Amino acid sequence: MARPQNIHQKRSGFRIPKDYFSSLEASVLTNLKSDTYSKKTGFETPKAYLADFKLETPSEEKQTRVIRLKEMTKWIAAASIVAFAIVGAMYIDEISPKKDIQFSDLNNDMIERYLDTHLDSPDEFIDYENTSVKKLVEENITTLEDKDIIEYLNDKLEDQDFDND
């Protein structure tokens, strides 16, 4: 808050002469009544300003066609939405994977590379708990004889691919 005593401490440096307001009215009236006051306003038309002026009746001009912006914005907005939808559909179709790809369409190298990069051990690939393989193994392991195993391996030995490229 400002204290009343601080208001008068700062002086501005501007002063009004003595008896300024008492003599102001008299000096203004004397200046108005004197001949030194110019009666001219400063605005004059030049000589022969209207000498070259020709009086003509205005002719009718063709009316220009006015295109309302409100109607155009509707069409522009609709066209831009359609264009955006078409471009988006083409882009999505290009980047999306084909849905009709089959496991048999993949070659062995692709499958091996995928399994090498995504699996730490082969046990992760087979989920025995949630497949029917576990049930088949448990049922057939007890009835399987050594002779059947050797015969199966001999038949399949020729089909095995031992090349590890």
Image: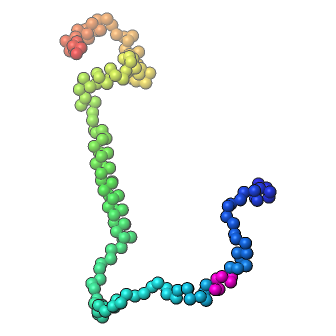
Residue in the image at 30% along x and 41% along y: 95
Number of numbered discs visible in the structure rendering: 0
Q: Residue furthest left?
A: 158
Q: Position of residue 15 (x, y in %)?
A: 69, 66
Q: Is residue 116 magenta?
A: no
SS majority, magenta: helix
The quarter of the picture where the C terminus appears is top left
Q: In screen coordinates, is 28 left or right of 140? A: right
* Residue in the foreground of this view, choosing between 68 and 113: 68
Q: In screen coordinates, is 135 left or right of 60? A: right
Q: Quadrant of residue 9?
A: bottom right
Q: Residue furthest top?
A: 146
Q: Is residue 14 above or below residue 155?
A: below
**First to last magenta residue range:** 25-30
Q: Position of residue 66 (x, y in %)?
A: 32, 77
Q: Is residue 162 above or below residue 19?
A: above
Can the viewer see residue 121?
yes
